[in-house]
Image (cartoon, rainbow, N blue to C red):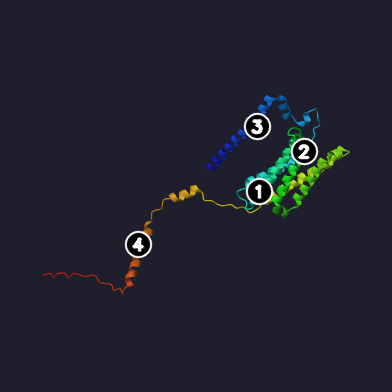
Amino acid sequence: MSGVRAAQSEDIQWLFRIIACFAVFAAALVLIFLYDYKIMQAMLRDRAEWGAQPFYLGAISQIGILTWAAGAAIALFTVAVAEDETTQPEKLTLLRCIGLFSLILCLDDVFQVHEVVAPRYLYIDQKAVLLLYALSALIIAFTFRRQLLKRPVLPAAAVSALAISMGLDLTEPYWPNLTIQLLVEDTFKQLGILLWTSFIIQQALAVLTSPRAVTLAPNPAEAEAEIRLPQAAPQPAIVAHTAARASTGVKKAKGAQGPFHPVPPRVEPQPRPR
């Protein structure tokens, strides 16, 4: 019964945390609405609803975003589950880095950071953002080169496909047909995302199936109960048996000093009748 109450208490704590986070999100929406309700309207509506666009607008891009999000979620969830139990912490560090990197790339695709946000609102060139992503990938590859070289096929293929996609994105003005350019670029991009997420799944399975370093600590409540446990009173039979063994030991000790001769009891003489 105590275990059920503890689980319910933990669920209530999680409920309050979720409500607190959602309250912050709702407060941000209210502030945006008070600032400009048109911005709020644009944020709440789907892209296909603007201008009677077809429902498949950006479908390939949405699939890539879902794949990025799945990879990031798998990596970070594995780190959270196996952080205190795995015997290979270097794999957890690798998963943490590639999970965060996947999350950043996912947000980039969602909000079109390197294509729209950076050059239009932050005044940062698109090439600079792509160069930053490439340097981040190189830092991860150099830091964890020993682990990556053990199974290099998936990460090498994923990085190669994504690098080709980035190169095709930069050569967009030089293509005579924009549709062909988008087709080739997105093909390599989706292939790279799929290979990258497969690499994350491979690393997560290696962590979750590795031997666990679990230390069984004693339960404090049980230890305290054992300390306070009253000792049972000795049974009469045990006491008698112990006394008999002690008496036998004393006799053996006396016998070791010399031969033992029993002494007959002294009989007092009786007076004769007169």
Kindly identify which residue carries mark 2: 126
Q: CA distance from mark 3 to mark 4?
A: 80 Å
Callout 2 crowding tier (Cα within 10 Å): few <14, some 14–19, many ≥20? some
Is 77 or 30 nearer to us in this picture?
Answer: 30
Q: Nearer the viewer, mark 3 or mark 1?
A: 1
On the image, which quarter does residue 29 sit in?
top right
- Tag on residue 243? 4
State the image coordinates of residue 270 (x, y, percent, origin top left): 16, 69
Q: Amino acid at mark 3?
A: Phe
| SS label for mark 4 | helix
Farthest right residue in view: 176
Q: Residue at x 59, y 34 (%)?
A: 16
The circle drawn on residue 25 is: 3
For the residue carrying disc 1, how many other residues have a C-alpha within 10 Å: few (<14), some (14-19), or many (20+)? some
Position of 188 with respect to 78 (left or right) is: right
Q: Secondary structure at mark 2?
A: helix
- CA distance separating discs 2 and 3: 30 Å
Name the residue that disc number 1 marks. Answer: 93
